[in-house]
Image (spheres, grey):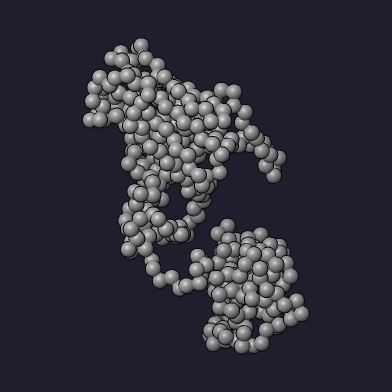
Amino acid sequence: MVDIDDASRRTEDLGLDGLASGSLEYPPFATEEIHFADFLNSLDRNSNDPRYRAEVAKALADPSGDDYHYFGNSQYYENSEFFPASASFQQHFSRYFAGHELNAFETQTKLANNTSVKRGNSRFPDSEDRNLNSTVDTENSYFQYEIPLSKRALDSLAAPQQVDDYIVGEVADADGNGTGWYQVRIPVQQYSRRVGDIQDFSLIEFIRLWTTGHEVPFTARFASLELVGSQWQKSEAITLERETPFDTTGTETVLTISSINNEENAETYLPPVGAVVSQSRLASGRVQNAREQSLLSVLRTWAQASSEPFSRRRIPDLTCSSIPTCACLFTPTDNWLTEPTWPHCRWKKVVRKPPCSCAWGRTRPMITTNTNSRSPQL
């Protein structure tokens, strides 16, 4: 917790420089006004440039530029002395994460007097020791991934025939129209470059995000940032297979496992038959369907009759209490487009049996295994 002396109204929540701004409770040597007096005296307070005068006013109020301001603080962002042309969307968030002085919940409630909304963003004092190991970390080793942000590049990479990149596609609505949002899926082992002496993924502590190449400020919004993972193993033997008439190890058969849901794939996703999709009511009063997700398995390029099972291993550190296992055996025939031999789906029941539907497309077979992402099972 942040330490506050109620009698003297002093606190340790003063930013990384340890200096107070605009406060009479601290001795002069501990204030930003005295420490940066030479800098403040060098400012031209009679300039005719309104933007320069605004920056001078901000510097006089907060010489270190480290005061915390909640993005809804109208007392600060609607002050014409600081923002003569009104604060932009980006400026409203400029002091939310970067401001460290009086950014704790308790200090905002007890000590902040330059805000219309006393709402902090931290319960502990700010520190440069991000991993809390009480050591100065000098190593700068990491894996780097690059994603183009131009609209033209995103549209090009989102094309269905482009499959060897991070851009999955543009998210469409239920009518198939583009929404301007793009789904990006980055396999962590397929990095663009490796920096430093890092060798593997056994110890990854932070994710750093930055942009380059733009000449003017821009706003990038993220619907969600998720770190997901699955563990799969290919079975070496299939119980139901009596004989393999061909050598399948040399074929170009490819089994692809992915997920599909009603948010990122609204134009193609259909809930499992009989599934009850929960709903939540937003603050505006509008009712919204919760996220519904299913497992999508695609088997491509059958050169010979073959069998490709897949199963999912249990991951102990997940919150799922049980994970069922599915093995599907395909025996395609020469005329499978007109008279398909349906696969035999066998489920190992752990708690309950999720619905499993096997469908055949005109260009390739497809198994769709539907499981509710909100249940204790995957």
- Given the current orientation, which residue lies at the most extreme right position? 7
Q: Is residue 283 left or right of residue 168?
A: right
Q: Residue at x 32, y 41 (%)?
A: 164
Q: Position of residue 187 (x, y in %)?
A: 38, 46
Q: Nearer the viewer, residue 331 or 336?
A: 331
Residue 238: quarter of image? top left
Could you say which quadrant of the image residue 255 lies in?
A: top left
Name the one closer to the observer, 7 or 269: 7
Q: Which residue is most to the top?
A: 339
Residue 237 placement, left or right of 374: left
Q: Is residue 84 above or below residue 10?
A: above
Q: Is residue 240 left or right of residue 125?
A: left
Residue 295 percent coordinates (x, y): 47, 32
Residue 344 x/y as whole percent = 41, 19
Residue at 36% across / 11% down in the picture? 339
Which image quadrant: the N terminus?
Answer: bottom right
Q: Is residue 175 visible?
A: no
Count the marks: how many? 0
Residue 221 appearing in the image: yes
Whether 356 is drawn above or below 164: the answer is above
Q: Is residue 375 above or below residue 243?
A: below
Residue sitting at x 55%, y 67%:
98
Q: Is residue 136 above or below residue 255?
A: below
Residue, x 33% and y 58% (percent of image)?
A: 199
Q: Position of residue 259 (x, y in %)?
A: 46, 35
Between 219 and 8, which is closer to the camera in this rendering? Answer: 8
